Image (cartoon, coloured by chain):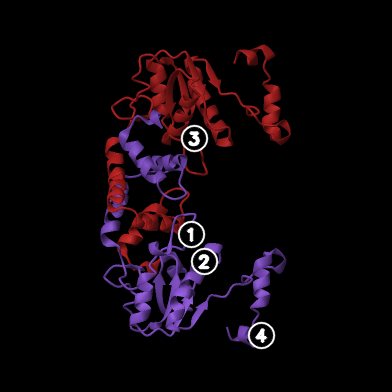
Chain colours: A red, B purple
Amino acid sequence: MDELRSHALAKAVDAFASLPGIGRKTAMRMVLHLLKQDENDVTNFGEALIRLKQDVRFCKTCHNLAEADYCHICANPNRQHQIICVVEDIRDVIAIENTGEHKGAYHVLGGRISPIDGTGPADLHIDSLIERISQNKVDELILALSCTLEGDTTNFYLFKKISAFSIPITTIARGIGVGDELEYADELTLARSIVHRLPYEKTLAG
Amino acid sequence: MDELRSHALAKAVDAFASLPGIGRKTAMRMVLHLLKQDENDVTNFGEALIRLKQDVRFCKTCHNLAEADYCHICANPNRQHQIICVVEDIRDVIAIENTGEHKGAYHVLGGRISPIDGTGPADLHIDSLIERISQNKVDELILALSCTLEGDTTNFYLFKKISAFSIPITTIARGIGVGDELEYADELTLARSIVHRLPYEKTLAG
């Protein structure tokens, strides 16, 4: 975008274009939107970003977002800290918290094993999970990763690593989504939902 | 997103969510992406935004982006300043400049007349266009607005305002896009392309 002829503008466009899913045209639209806004608002936006990396920290136990050394879940004495739910991302913590069904703690891996993206086990918070398991009493480890090839690979890797500790390991249920119609479900999901069928009484309880 | 429990994070998410076309989930994804980046990069992003409003100015003649009082087009003595192309937005200037077909100047209205969005003639840079026409010799005014109801309304409003100056007013051609197939063109476009048909020799010249 040589025609911009403005260094400040080009830098702002570059910054937005570096975000995931944002191309140069969208970045330009965002910058032009900001140029129309009040100077105070734009300055606040900039300062919010600068403070972001300084103020936001990650929990030393579970790698969730935290404002202190430990996140509000790990620091909460009312949570069942012997039940650890392993997730890929902080957004998954938020999503599961919104359901209100998990009363235990979390462990955020920070991604999944993906050879294509160059993410190996060493890039994830697996060592700290092993350490956490070996030093604390854990009653159950819930694997709540994506239902993809990469998620399954990560599940299997974790299962192999953790099986030595003889802790019950569970995974979240895979099946037909609530409100979904059978005829639109893909074959694999439908197959799994039949293989892992439940006694009817159990569905009444849940 | 009360579950975030982090003021710095919430502020950054709010800032991104204020951008056009960005919802809270996408904003959250952007912020989490930034949290994984190098602290320097994020600080630079923030500083680019703070400097944006300070450094980027608008041309006093045509309201295009400028680094000085006048934009690089208005300040260029090699452009035909008697031919003014009226556009809605700065992005339109960039798009037309990229074609290389317009050697004249521009006038950026900053939008179009849209009662639904609450944009009236007074919200656009129409007064400065009238002033520009009355004080300078203008050979042609090219209306290059969107081919929408709102664009047409704005065209008509400008036409009425400017007709007193007896300046030739043209609009960009409407018709079937280059590379488009007739059968997929909408009826109105096809109708216009027939009504405003050109002598074949003219298309050879262009």
User: Does the CB distance between marks 4 and 1 fall below 8 Å?
Assistant: no
How much space separates mark 4 and mark 1, taking CA atoms? 37 Å
User: Does the CB distance between marks 2 and 1 fall below 8 Å?
Assistant: yes
Q: Do tags 4 and 1 sit on the same chain?
A: yes
How much space separates mark 2 and mark 3, taking CA atoms? 54 Å
Secondary element under disc 2, as helix, strand or loop, is helix
* A149 versus B51 height, above or below: above
At label 1, which amino acid type do we have?
A: Ser
Q: Residue at x 44, y 18 (%)?
A: A104
Secondary element under disc 4, as helix, strand or loop, is helix
Q: Which residue is mark 2?
A: B153
How much space separates mark 3 and mark 4, taking CA atoms? 61 Å
At label 3, which amino acid type do we have?
A: Arg
Secondary element under disc 3, as helix, strand or loop, is loop
How much space separates mark 1 and mark 3, taking CA atoms? 48 Å
User: Does the CB distance between marks 1 and 3 fall below 8 Å?
Assistant: no
Q: Which residue is mark 1?
A: B114
Chain name for mark 3:
A
User: Does the CB distance between marks 4 and 2 fall below 8 Å?
Assistant: no
How much space separates mark 2 and mark 1, taking CA atoms? 8 Å
Chain name for mark 2:
B
* B76 versus A31 height, above or below: below
Q: Do tags 2 and 3 sit on the same chain?
A: no
At label 4, which amino acid type do we have?
A: Tyr
